[in-house]
Image: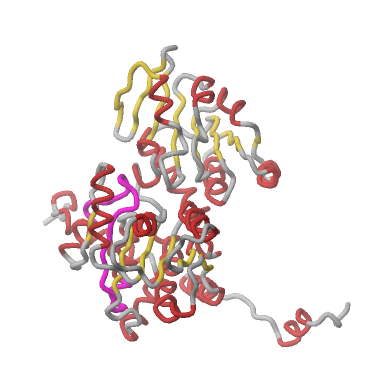
Amino acid sequence: MKYDIKNISLAKKGKLRIEWAMNNMPVLNLIRKRFEKEKPLKNTRVACCLHVTTETAALALTLKSAGANISICASNPLSTQDDVAASLVKDYGIPTFSIKGEDNKTYYKHILSALESKPEITMDDGADLVSVLHKKDYGFMPMGGTEETTTGVIRLKAMANDGVLKYPVIAVNDALTKHMFDNRYGTGQSTIDGIIRATNKLIAGTNFVVCGYGWCGRGVAMRAKGMSANVIICEVDPLRAIEASMDGFMVMSLSKAAKIGDIFVTTTGDVSVIRREHFLAMKDGAILANSGHFNVEIDIPELKKLSVKTRIIRDFVEEFTLKSKKRIYILGEGRLINLAAAEGHPAQVMDMSFANQALSAEYIRRHHGELDNQVYPVPKDLDERIAFLKLRSMGITIDKLTERQKKYLSSWQEGT
């Protein structure tokens, strides 16, 4: 009898997809095998506010194998994969509070549900758990937390600088094995994937505008160029602007790019990057998408004020008609397009990101008494261990320094 995945239950479909992701996350699998033996998080309550995807499920199962008691909520209203959420609850007994497309009220209700366990460790993607815990006294405070994304790290460092952060947090995003790969290769591929799934537009030959040339912007620009787009970079940082130019991209102000762009992607983590004056300058049919964490990079409220009519023309595509009859298209409500319209980052790259999460949770459990209420980097030895595990899983071997080479590099007396 032919096996038809379309006709199986939601949870069963999710379980199969989780299995597929786990097959492509060898580093996390190695960590999970050790965790199963050592139980470094035994009876530790962990709340995760992450995108509820197959890769997150693999992380949750790794933490569970370490003995942790897990609860999960979504870090974005449009990023949940409902079949994965169903499987986490039904097949693995992990309390999961998330529904794709939930409204803002439900989103925060789910965050509070995840916090009912009074977690000892929080895992954030955008710092929403930390933020909620700091707005009201819930009668407990975690021993530590981790943060997955650039936007969240910015928020947490601001809290630490203001002296209001009440528990230590490890900036997983800042690990080299995270941002150099996840932000660049993961965001690059999945953003293009989301735009194509939402619009079915040809990328080749378009004027493709990328706002921000950080690691995420680099990745998006690289992939758009690989699909034969004419890539334009808009930046406020002079060093990144020079880098983008020397990488072979056109660099100009957004006011100029707005007049010629066909597709626009924001990757800055800032507010109102694309705003009123840019909307008014854009061509009819301009497509706007966001790959920053929050849906504030495109000033959608201002676009609504300029519009005489709006309608949903395709899944995840909203058409705004201005008084001039010009049409502008917003993808995925201005939220993360790679998760709103696609499946997020591939498992192979999330393998390293979530390995950082797992090992950082273990580090917090063992060292929380030594940490102040600050934002800490992932310890260098953990970052390097993950890199070596990834190389091993890829079948790659590299050289080692000889003792003479080590001595030469460590001595100021050695000469040519």
Which is more toward the observer, 159 or 340?
A: 159
Residue 63 drawn at (x, y percent): 32, 72
Residue 185 visible in the snapshot: no
Say how the picture is coloured. secondary structure
The residue drawn where x is 51% and y is 54% is 154
For the record, the magenta segment spans: 62-84
Q: Is residue 234 left or right of residue 166?
A: right
Rendering quarter of residue 334: top left
Q: Residue at x 38, y 73 (%)?
A: 143
Quick one: which residue is furthest to the top in this view? 324
Q: Height in image: 266 above or below 33?
A: above
Asked if one can make out residue 30 in the rendered structure from this viewpoint, the answer is yes
Q: Is residue 379 left or right of residue 40?
A: right
View extreme (left): residue? 1
Specify the quadrant of the image occupied by residue 313.
top left
Seen at 65% across and 44% down, the residue is 237
Whether the magenta-drawn stretch holds residue 200 is answered as no
User: Residue 62, position in %: x, y?
Assistant: 32, 72
Percent across and percent down for residue 19 are 28, 64
Number of numbered discs overlaid on the protein picture: 0
Screen quadrant of the N terminus: bottom left
Quadrant of the image containing the C terminus? bottom right
Name the spot of residue 193 as percent of width and height, x first: 41, 44
